[in-house]
Image (cartoon, helix red, strand yellow):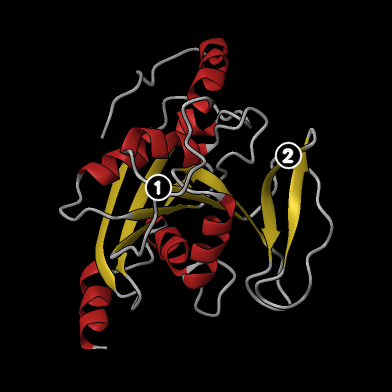
Amino acid sequence: MTKLHDWAVSTPRALEMQWPLAARVSRVSEVTVPRLIAGVDISTSKTSEMATGAVVVLSYPELKLVAVEVASGKLGFPYIPGLLSFREAPLILAAFAKLTVTPDLVLVDGQGIAHPRRIGLASHLGLFLEKPTIGCAKSRLCGCHRAPGDEPGSYAELVDDGEIIGVALRTRRGVKPVYVSIGHKVDLPAAIHWVLACCRGYRLPEPARLAHLAAGGNLEPEKDAAASVAG
């Protein structure tokens, strides 16, 4: 893990930092066949500034649970769309620091370069972790797209200011698409491929889905890990 900067910065400074960070993002895929795939998410309180960041690690291709770590604490940055990585990344990185296994690929419930300044949470985390990361968000932050087809695997390009920044990807018939984008050290075809490869009948790919449960305190690590080994 590389510490690129401190997190205790002002809003103007955070905005100033984003373009240089975006320039460091690699859009060239370094993913071969991953042995371990991580998913990350964060759960925030509606009544306080407390939150829980979670990372789950699954084996591939089985997608069996290998590890779960969480880190809880007070958020140190205000809620400002486009600057959420400054608010959420510290707790997620704290959860990563507890891992005793090393994932080869990270799926992030958030944006990668599908961001006004091309440095969403997935890209920011990728730079710190020095790992291939993919953004797989439930909602669109910027850009426009046509409706993707109804079949799982159908997608429509997400375009912002004339640049393709991701896709709206249908992962399950009858549900809204997810927004997939390059995080770091992947290209867009690889990002689409690995999101679909990790889907198991839900809207979200399994690593991101389980990370969402873990962040909300709804995943029991010992019980689920034991069930994964048994199954």
The answer to which image quadrant residue 76 occupies is top left
Residue 176 makes an appearance in the image: yes
Q: Position of residue 179 (x, y in %)?
A: 64, 54
- The residue lying toward the viewer, choosing from 220 and 22, is 22
Q: Position of residue 177 (x, y in %)?
A: 69, 63
Which residue carries the number 2 mark?
A: 142
Q: Position of residue 158 (x, y in %)?
A: 74, 49
Q: Nearer the viewer, mark 2 or mark 1?
A: 1
- Under circle 2, the secondary element is loop
- The residue lying toward the viewer, choosing from 22 and 81, is 22
Picture quarter with the C terminus = bottom left
Name which residue type carries label 2: Cys
Earlier sequence position, callout 2 versus callout 1: 1
Q: Is residue 67 above or below residue 97?
A: below
- Under circle 1, the secondary element is loop
What residue is drawn where x is 69% and y is 41%? Answer: 141
Q: Position of residue 80 (x, y in %)?
A: 61, 28
Single out the residue that lies furthest toward the bottom.
231
What residue is drawn where x is 82% and y is 62%? Answer: 147
The answer to which image quadrant residue 210 occupies is bottom left
Q: Which mark is residue 132?
A: 1
Q: Is residue 21 above or below residue 188?
A: above
What residue is drawn where x is 46% and y is 70%? Answer: 198
Q: Is residue 218 above or below residue 93?
A: below
The answer to which image quadrant residue 229 occupies is bottom left
Q: Residues within 10 Å of mark 1 (few under 14, many from 20)?
A: many
Q: Is residue 49 left or right of residue 64?
A: right
- How far separated are the C-alphas under marks 2 and 1? 22 Å
